[in-house]
Amino acid sequence: MKTNNHAPPRLVVVSNRGPYRISATSRGIKYERTIGGLVTSLLPMLEQNGGEWIAWGEPAGRYEIPLRKPRFSLHHLSLTEAQARGFYQGFSNGALWPLCHCFLGRTRYDLNEWRIYEEVNQLFATAALEDSSETDILWVHDYQLARVPHVIRQQRPSAKLLFFWHIPFPPVDLFRTIPWRRPLLESLLACDLIGFHIPGYARNFAENAVEILGARYEDGTIHYGGRATRVLARPIGIDYAAIDREARSQRIEKRVHNLRQALGAGTLIVGVERMDYTKGIVERLRAVEYLLEHQPAWRGKFSLIQIVTPSRLDVEAYRQKKREIDETVGRVNGRFSDSTWIPIRYLHRSFSPSELITYYRVADIALVTPLRDGLNLIAKEFAAARIHDDGVIILSEFAGAAHQLPEALITNPYGQEEMAATLEQALKMPISEQRWRMEAMRNRIKSQDIKWWANEFLGCLNS
């Protein structure tokens, strides 16, 4: 443990995934930025203010980021194959992920996986304690590390400890199915402050604490075991200024022109997701199929560019979902393509943030329709990139972002007919309506950016 009590407090971020993949090449160490909402939101904060990020990654060790003028330290922890399987593929993504997204039928509880989850959380907590001082702020993130606060609080009672839960928090009737529901809740309540994206998730958490633990909830604070934990709902922000600046750059302008030329005329719709059964990719493809089948006048008038980033393909549920997407794309294109037009352009690979901004600029409509999502930053990134205040966002009512972006066209991703009708509404929307909707969303995202989000939590800790 660092013991310099006179040093200014640093921010120590603890998460499952770090901001970079690191590999050794003949030219030295190579840093490749990872993709995801957590990294997109937190990395600019550490780049500007310094601190440390503790995450699972190979090769293990400490790295100064960036190499030439280091701003923060990245500490990679190594896991054995058995630990990775039980912790990540097992309890985290075989139990907590499907449960919190209301997919109880996909949820699996395994005692050995729970024990490994506890073991790995102990590793993260130990690293956080060793790498920080009494004055540092420890900010733990997401469902993979829900037991870390318990260990930290036991060994450092005075710790300044925050937690942010990035995915939905389920209602009591679902959460109580977890055999280890009490230790999970008790660990989260070891924090000074726990955050969620929207009030509904915060309300679910408080109700779980009251009903399962017998805690008391009053004025945004949960009282349990002699401690008081503040509960705050704030949707995570993006680096709006950076996206807006990149979207206006000459480099992006040139790419937009070239890509639009290559894709041809017609309305372009973009969908960007990682491979996951919660993202509603098949459902949106079927909605496109429904529209083309029942409204043949739209054939040849638009194309959907569906970007899917590979993810967790070592998990059978994800391999099955990829096969289903492949088959659905093949069927729709087989039914409706002609010699000059393809309704769905399916791109299954990773894209850099700059490449995605190009697609956000090129497209006329963003189709963001997860079956369940903690927030969804794609909708916010798309809006930030719309420098001419045009374009339409179609947004699932089950994405947390729908709470923050009511000017989007809100739809039910489970209903083919409703989604097709919403898509037709977007295709017909006049530019004047596009602009007032988009301008309102852009202004809100600009004011509630990543700095606002971080200040909301860090300010609460100091108040």
Image (tube, rainbow, N blue to C red):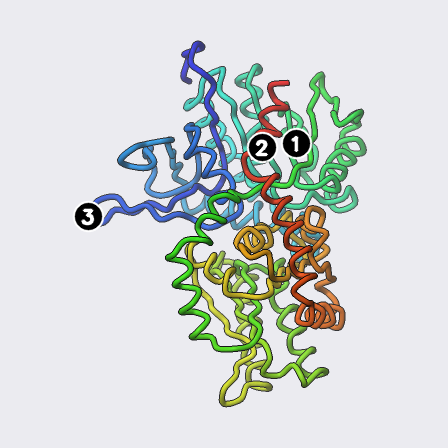
**Kind of residue at badge 3:** Arg
Q: CA distance from mark 1 to mark 2?
A: 8 Å
Residue 410: quarter of image: bottom right
Instruction: Estimate the x, y position of residue 432 in percent, counting from the top left.
Output: 68, 62
**Which element type, helix, strand or loop, lies under badge 3?**
loop
> Which numbered dot is residue 87?
none
Instruction: Estimate the x, y position of residue 258 in percent, counting from the top left.
Output: 40, 69
Circle 3 is placed at which residue position?
Answer: 27
| Residue plotted at (64% across, 44% down) | 444
Circle 1 is placed at which residue position?
Answer: 183
**Which element type, helix, strand or loop, lies under badge 2?**
loop
Along the line of sight, the residue nearer the viewer: 97 or 296: 296
> Which numbered dot is residue 147?
2
Q: Quadrant of the C terminus?
A: top right
**Kind of residue at badge 2:** Arg
Which residue is farthest top?
6
Instruction: Estimate the x, y position of residue 105 in percent, counting from the top left.
Output: 69, 57
Instruction: Estimate the x, y position of residue 247 in percent, counting from the top left.
Output: 46, 54
Q: Check if mark 1's residue and mark 2's residue have beta carbons within 8 Å.
A: yes
Q: CA distance from mark 3 to mark 1?
A: 47 Å
**Kind of residue at badge 1:** Pro
